[in-house]
Amino acid sequence: MEAMKFQALMLAMVVGAMALSSTIVAAQEAPAPSPASDAPLSLPTLMASLAPLALGFFL
């Protein structure tokens, strides 16, 4: 049972690392948002930040 939890954790970490690296590449290629935009405060950004925390808390 512990091995399955460890494998799930490792899989989640690998998927998270791949997603993070792809967003960094996309951010380098995209133009910077204007200071007046609310880009950092969007709901998808909030959900993407809270989902791994909740996953780690409940596993």
Image: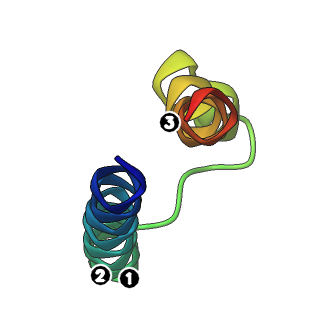
Label 1 sits on a secondary structure element that is helix
Label 2 Cα crowd, 10 Å radius (few <14 / some 14-19 / many 20+): few
For the residues marked 3 and 1, what is the alpha-carbon distance in whole angstroms?
19 Å
Check contact, mark 3 vs mark 1: CB within 8 A.
no
Q: Earlier in the sequence, mark 2 or mark 3?
A: 2
Eye-nearest disc, 2 or 3: 3
The residue under the point 62% across, 50% down is 34
Check contact, mark 2 vs mark 1: CB within 8 A.
yes
Q: Which residue is mark 1?
A: 28
User: Could you say which is closer to the camera, residue 33 or residue 53?
Assistant: 53
User: Could you say which is closer to the camera, residue 17 or residue 32?
Assistant: 17
The residue under the point 50% across, 36% down is 48
The amino acid type found where label 1 is placed reads Gln
Q: Which residue is mark 3?
A: 48
Residue 25 numbered mark, or none: 2
Eye-nearest disc, 3 or 1: 3
